Image (cartoon, helix red, strand yellow):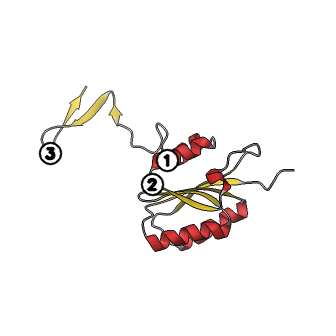
Amino acid sequence: MSGPQLFLALARMHHISNPPKFRRLKRFATQANVSGFVKTGKPGVLVFEGEQASIKRFLGNVRGLRYLDFHHVDTKPMPVSQTRRLAGAKNGLQELKDMSELVNVTECIGEKGWFRVQMGMSKGEGFIQKICVENMHYLPNRTKNSRQCDT
């Protein structure tokens, strides 16, 4: 017999730095029965898992904190065969200081590709591409108001 269907969710915001607000964020995760990781600083990123109703309740509470530029990026069902859990299924949020740590955590549960795509970190996603017009690349010249064309 298998347990309830678990979901994996991703949210981001401009930053997570206010200590009282951060404590409330962690308390909301515990109360909603979700587990996962939070990357503090800029940008603030949440990767967490739980039942669908728990995730919905947690996200509602987080919106109430009025974080700047808060976005619920994605929620997806975790495969039933998934045996690895975020944070060892420990209830609440564990703090990470670096984005690379968050990438490593998602890699451990087989969701690194999903995380990178959703965060705009995969090649060709989310970044400004060089503008090439008829094989001409515009490079800044030494003067402020002119450009030279490198053909």
Q: Which residue is disc 2 drawn over?
A: 97
Determine which of the numbered discs, if any, sits on residue 101 in the image: 1
33 to 118, vertically: above or below: below
Q: Which residue is disc 3 drawn over?
A: 144
* Tag 2: amino acid: Lys
In the image: residue 32, left or right of residue 131: right
Determine which of the numbered discs, if any, sits on residue 84 in the image: none
In the image: residue 133, left or right of residue 19: left
Position of residue 77 measured from the top left corner of the image (x, y, whole percent): 71, 50
Question: What residue lies at 72% left-to-right and 59% top-to-bottom?
Answer: 51
Circle 1 sits in a helix, a strand or a loop, which is it? helix
* Comparing labels 2 and 3, the label whose residue is closer to the camera: 2
In the image: residue 128, left or right of residue 37: left
Location of residue 79 (image quadrant):
top right
Whether residue 57 can be seen here: no
Give the mark nearest the N terminus, 1 or 3: 1
* Tag 1: amino acid: Glu
Which of the two residues, 53 or 32, is positioned nearer the viewer here? 32
Which of the two residues, 67 or 37, is positioned nearer the viewer here? 37
Question: What residue lies at 39% left-to-right and 43% top-to-bottom?
Answer: 128
Whether residue 129 can be seen here: yes
